[in-house]
Image: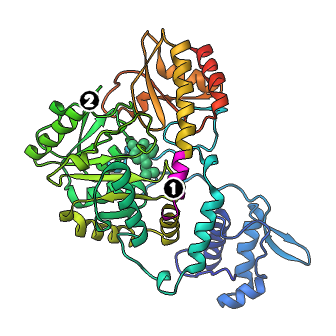
Amino acid sequence: MEFHVSLAGRGDLSARIYRQLHEAVVDGRLRSGEKLPPTRELARRLAVSRNTVALAYERLTAEGFLVGRVGAGTFVCANPPAPAPATATGPGAVPPRPVWRGLATPRASTRRPPYDFGVGVPDTSRFPMAAWRRQVARQLRDVTAADTLYGDPAGHPGLRAEIARHVGLSRSVRVSAEQVLVTNGTQQALDLVARVLLAPGDRVAVEEPGYPPARELFASHGARLAGVPVDAEGVVVQALPVDTRLVYTTPSHQFPLGPPMSLDRRTALLEWARDAGAVIVEDDYDSEFRFADRPLEPLHSLDRGDRVLYVGSFSKTMLPMLRLGFLVAPPSLLDALRAAKRLADLQSETTNQGAMAGFMADGLFVRHLRRVTREYAARRTMILTVLRRDFADRLEVVPSTAGLHLAAWPTGDVDVTALVERAAAAGVGVADLAEYHGFGPGRPGIALGYGRIDLDRIEEGLRLLDEVW
Ligand SMILES: Cc1ncc(COP(=O)(O)O)c(C=O)c1O
């Protein structure tokens, strides 16, 4: 492709050519080894003298960005000097609004510890990739001309119907497909809810400890956050501020501690919300993995006043990379939520949605869930067995009945942050509960996920944890 050089801007003509070529090499638009046009040709294109171009080339060559090869031409160097790191504070730097200053996003680490008890991640190696590939291929094969255009912002009709059926059967969340919105994961569902329901300064109550991306999302919308403590029965209703507009909660498997919200607490929370005129966002992120007979009714089905928005995710049951989640909303909010989705991104990508609909309709989703739940149950039992056997004098496991991780509190005096660091150095990845506290230090503890660790590595991983205690 011909590199475009503009002569607009300040400085003499040679300096302008120099600057643009320099930037293109530094930011990678011109790659190592790429050939530049001969000076004569570029000079003709730009209607400048050949000398003007040659001067720019000479300077870039002297600085190590270009190299001239006799008889062959001028090329971008194999290893041009590295660009200066971008600074956030130069005189012309544009600052974000203050609310964004505390919301820096750490880069995802690709390094996995050998004994990975990471939280919030499923075992992607158990994913039936071949069956999924066939569903995706079918979508691409059967795509019609109309499918390739824009669709309904609320999502693929087939997937909305499958989700309605699924939550109706497995969670007794009785809704029509019309009430289901497909989103790019839970995170976008929360974003849409915030857009539609929150004005800057509105009070949002979140669980403490809780799920940081939810807390940060509401903060980014200008909400005033209140961290509400969680006890053995779930979020402490008496601690909810009276002016709360929205409560974000994880009743099936409190994130990150794990206990399910008791039925009494669910009833109390719903009553409180009715009296306060507040809405509840029920994040049911990993309750499909169930290890007790009968799950409690979701807040959504206990609610008779349409105050509960129910959010689900395929990140744990399928793959996080699919970015598939959903929102079940009361009819009064549907039009606004659909409009919010349209304004956010017009619609979610349709091939994966269609493939997911097929995967569910063909019974493959339920089969996959059954299979991985068996595997996760075995891992969870193994962790519990070892903790009870070897850590009984040091750790109190927080009771839970669902999900992909367990939390535990040390009973003695131990610096958990230092312990987690020692464990990491020994190749054992466990989470420090301090990561999930947003309003103060909180009770120290650890969380152990079983989405990523194979059954036969659990004992050795916990033995190493024992060693560094
Ligand atoms: C509490 C909670 N909600 C939701 C999710 C999933 O988010 P998403 O659907 O955006 O991937 C997670 C993932 O770790 C979570 O821990």
Residue at mark 1 to residue at mark 2: CA–CA distance:
35 Å
Q: What amino acid is at disc 1?
A: Phe
- Tell me which segment is drawn in magenta: 361-370
Quadrant showing the N terminus: bottom right
Is residue 43 positioned above or below 457 on the image?
below
The mark lying in front, picked from 1 and 2, is 1
Is residue 130 positioned above or below 262 on the image?
below
**Which of the colour schemes (rainbow, by chain, secondary structure, one colour) is used?**
rainbow
Q: What kind of element bears circle 1?
A: helix
Foreground residue, 343 or 17?
Answer: 343
Q: Quadrant of residue 396?
A: top left
Q: Quadrant of residue 239?
A: top left
The residue sitting at 42% across, 12% down in the picture is 411
Q: Is residue 51 left or right of residue 427?
A: right
The residue sitting at 35% across, 69% down in the picture is 154
The residue sitting at 8% across, 44% down in the picture is 275
Magenta: main secondary structure: helix
> Which residue in the rendered view is the most extreme toward the left?
275
Disc number for residue 229: 2
Disc number for residue 365: 1
**Which x, y percent locates residue 85?**
58, 51
Q: What kind of element bears circle 2?
A: strand
Q: Is residue 222 left or right of residue 390?
A: left
Is residue 153 positioned above or below 462 on the image?
below
Q: Earlier in the sequence, mark 1 or mark 2?
A: 2
Q: What amino acid is at disc 2?
A: Pro
